[in-house]
Image (cartoon, rainbow, N blue to C red):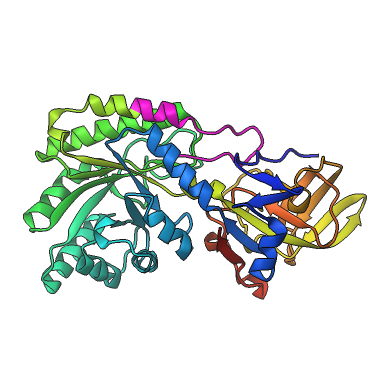
């Protein structure tokens, strides 16, 4: 038997079934017309943003990194909850605009932006988080061609990273950003060319659960902002401090103490030099805002025994939940939080492995988990499915196609 991750707070049972947004899992599956199905909870999303605002200093703006989940109805909801959106492609930019996000509230990061993407962003007045000197030169030239002033920030590749993070985005040689020592000269080039210098984007890592590590990273980031400001001789209008806030996925994971992070950041803001008094600061969060708000529902289509082990075969799989299968950057496979949705309040009775419908041994959603007795027709719920699920999985692998999605 292998442990499963902690089910996020806020999920309750109605008549013994898992309920999301006050509706049972089986009713949601009927509404959707079929499974597999991603369900995103409006209540969870609103509560997460409210809790975060309460914990963070008032000076700090909250941006949604929409790579976490670009589902259009969710974007429309988030547009009314957060202060800005961070996109990482021309496609995400168009989705944000379609959701009603004003272009002035959008920043565009990511290496390898195409000229057509730069042109679209510049024409709209979107802030470009430039990843290299070459990208800056292309943006300046495009601005001249369009007769528009590019809004350019510089993404900085810091010498430090976020300790204990699931994915390191800074420190050492990286495809992201401009090495810190080259940033002052690049900013001066932006200003001299007549472009609008917007500030810095400094992202050191993601998926950290240790408050002390995030506090240390933010302190290093603010110190770097001071150093760069001194070298440039002009304060940035805006600084994106990155994100890094993680959520508990696996056995033993504990929620991030955002109260401690917010208190430390407030003290750090109070100690900033006067030259940064008018600088606007934000954090950029994706997974932390939406991850725990999502549940993946998949129906059991077969129950079988092999060499004494029970396998529950579902109509879903890694083509929708690559991360839960352990094939999205995980070194050692561990179980996401999982339950039998229509038996949410039933005590565990057997040890089973939950597998998908794909013809590959990689397609395993839960390994030797202790769960209630389940049969064909029952619903499996995989939690923490609100981020990097539907959009980050190979939906068309073996011709299976995408899952349904709904916001409730």
Residue 234, quarter of picture: top left
The residue segment tinted magenta is: 244-264
Looking at the image, is 209 positioned above or below residue 176?
above
Q: Indicate the position of residue 304 as horizontal and vertical percent values.
A: 89, 59
Query: Picture coordinates of residue 124 (x, y %)?
Result: 22, 67
**Residue plotted at (49% across, 34% down):** 164
Examine the rendering and report whether any part of residue 337 can be seen.
Answer: no
- Which residue corresponds to the image point at 60% horizontal and 69% vertical from the top-left? 402
Left/right placement of residue 259 relative to residue 297 reads left
The residue nearer to you, when weighing 297 against 185, is: 297
Residue name at image x 35 percent, y 54 percent: 86
Magenta-colored stretch includes residue 256: yes
Quick check: is 357 in the magenta stretch?
no
The image quadrant of residue 262 is top left
Residue 160's spot in the image, x, y percent?
A: 36, 35
Name the main secondary structure of what is drawn in magenta.
loop
**88 is higher (above) or lower (below) than 287:** below
Q: Residue at x 68, y 64 (%)?
A: 29
Along the horizontal axis of the image, is 269 left or right of 383? left
């Amino acid at each position: 038997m292998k442990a499963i991750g902690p089910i996020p707070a806020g999920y309750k049972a109605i008549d013994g079934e898992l309920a999301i947004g006050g509706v049972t899992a089986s009713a949601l599956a009927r509404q959707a017309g079929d499974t597999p199905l991603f369900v995103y909870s409006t209540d969870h999303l609103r509560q997460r943003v409210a809790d975060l605002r309460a914990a963070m200093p008032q000076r700090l703006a909250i941006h949604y990194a929409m790579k976490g989940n670009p589902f259009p109805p969710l974007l429309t909801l988030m547009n009314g909850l957060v202060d800005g959106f961070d996109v990482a492609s021309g496609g995400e930019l168009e989705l944000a605009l379609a959701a009603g996000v004003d272009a002035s509230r959008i920043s565009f990061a990511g290496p390898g932006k195409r000229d057509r993407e730069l042109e679209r962003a510049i024409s709209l007045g979107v802030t470009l988080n430039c990843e290299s000197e070459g990208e800056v030169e292309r943006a300046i030239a495009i601005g001249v061609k369009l007769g528009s002033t590019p809004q350019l920030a510089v993404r900085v590749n810091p010498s430090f990273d976020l300790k204990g993070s699931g994915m390191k985005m800074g420190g050492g040689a990286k495809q992201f950003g401009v090495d810190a020592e080259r940033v002052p000269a690049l900013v001066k080039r932006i200003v001299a060319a007549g472009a609008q210098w917007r500030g810095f984007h400094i992202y050191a890592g993601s998926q950290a659960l240790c408050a002390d590590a995030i506090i240390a990273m933010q302190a290093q980031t603010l110190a770097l902002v001071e150093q760069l400001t001194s070298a440039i001789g002009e304060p940035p209008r805006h600084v994106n401090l990155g994100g890094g806030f993680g959520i508990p996925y696996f056995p033993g994971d504990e929620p991030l103490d955002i109260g401690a992070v917010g208190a430390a950041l407030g003290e750090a803001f109070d100690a900033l030099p006067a030259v940064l008094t008018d600088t606007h600061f934000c954090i950029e969060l994706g997974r932390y805002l939406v991850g725990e708000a999502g549940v993946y529902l998949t129906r059991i289509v077969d129950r079988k025994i092999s060499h004494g082990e029970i396998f529950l075969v579902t109509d879903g799989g890694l083509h929708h939940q690559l991360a839960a299968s352990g094939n999205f950057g995980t070194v050692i496979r561990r179980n996401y939080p999982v339950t039998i949705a229509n038996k949410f309040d039933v005590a565990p009775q057997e040890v089973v492995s939950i597998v998908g419908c794909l013809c590959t041994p990689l397609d395993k959603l839960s390994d030797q988990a202790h769960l209630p007795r389940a049969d064909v027709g029952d619903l499996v719920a995989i939690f923490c499915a609100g981020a990097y699920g539907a959009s980050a999985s190979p939906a068309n692998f073996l011709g299976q196609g995408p899952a349904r999605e709904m916001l409730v």
